[in-house]
Amino acid sequence: MAKVSRRRPMAEINVVPYIDVMLVLLVIFMVAAPMLTQGIVVDLPEASSGPLDIDENEATLVVSIKADGSYYINVGEDEQAVPLIKIEAQAKKIIAANRKIKVLVEGDRNLDYGTVINLMNILQTAGAASVGLITEPPQ
């Protein structure tokens, strides 16, 4: 008499291929996540803003945009008109000389939003850690 052997169903799941897929997806997301964030980093206040505490010994770089679209770089007391093309090069030199310099943008209220954002982007490309906006208090 021949012995009939029955196979029992296998109740185990082979998880090795799933781990490989998970690791590939993890690498894809780790590489793709930094590419998804765009924009200019601006620290926005959570409450009404007050005046900045700036020491007289502390260096500040103020870039102004007038209503006619002309750009000015104010370093200390002097103010010089500069075309937009040269602002990045000059700001890069100033920031490289003093890494702790505060960079501020002063724009006319009649300018469009894109002009100010474009300038802020150029200043961040030049190496500014953060770019602040100068405003007047409400009257």
Image (tube, rainbow, N blue to C red):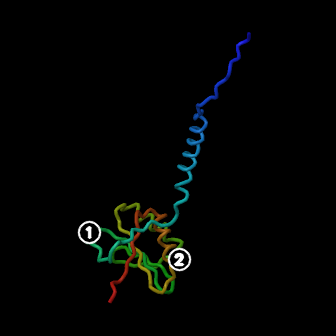
Camera-side residue: 82 or 123?
123
Instruction: Residue 59 in the image: state x and y as whole percent.
Output: 32, 68
Instruction: Residue 60 in the image: state x and y as whole percent.
Output: 34, 70
Q: Quadrant of residue 78?
A: bottom left
Instruction: Residue 19 in the image: state x and y as whole percent.
Output: 56, 38
Indicate left or right for 33 with 139 as reference: right
Q: Residue at x 50, y 86 (%)?
A: 68
Residue 114 - label: 2
Q: Nearer the viewer, mark 1 or mark 2?
A: 2
Three-letter code, disc 1: Asn
Q: Residue at x 37, y 73 (%)?
A: 75
Q: Residue furthest right?
A: 1
Instruction: Residue 37 in the image: state x and y as whole percent.
Output: 52, 60
Query: Which quadrant holds the N terminus?
Result: top right
**For the residues marked 1 and 2, what is the alpha-carbon distance in whole angstroms?**
33 Å
Residue 57 - label: 1
